[in-house]
Image (cartoon, helix red, strand yellow):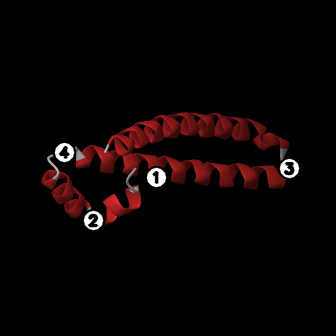
Amino acid sequence: MHNIKDIRQNPNQFKKDFNNRFIDVDLEKILSLDEKNRKLIQEKEALEKEKKDISKTKDPTLFEKSKKISEQISKYINEQSSIKIQLDDILNSL
């Protein structure tokens, strides 16, 4: 499996290398999935921080907000997991 960081840093070299081996690769799709994956991770981590800050206040009026944040985190985890599987499948096939 190829390292996504290497592909991200030098996509043109990977495209050239794959073309030399007569392998057709949708590099834009790989990079797009990687970008979505990283964005979801960042958003999830920001929500986790916000939820942690809310729980530190121990303010019962913020319970509903914390619950909604948990639901959003769960959605991000599911979506990120799906994207990660797609990305890993593509990278494993190369």
Q: CA distance from mark 3 to mark 1?
A: 31 Å
Amino acid at circle 4: Ile
Q: How many numbered dots are placed on residues in this image?
A: 4
Amino acid at circle 2: Asn
Tag shown at residue 23: 4
**Tag 1 or tag 4, which sits nearer the N-term?**
4
Vertical side of 61 occupied by 21: above or below: below
Q: Position of residue 70 (x, y in %)?
A: 68, 38
**Tag 1 or tag 2, which sits nearer the N-term?**
2
> Element at badge 1?
helix
Q: Position of residue 37 (x, y in %)?
A: 45, 47
**Tag 4 or tag 2, which sits nearer the N-term?**
2
Q: Nearer the viewer, mark 3 or mark 4?
A: 4
Tag shown at residue 10: 2
Circle 1 Cα neighbour tier, 10 Å, few/some/many (<14 / 14–19 / ≥20): some
Q: Quadrant of residue 78?
A: top right
Q: Which residue is mark 3?
A: 58
Tag shown at residue 22: none
Q: Which residue is mark 1?
A: 38
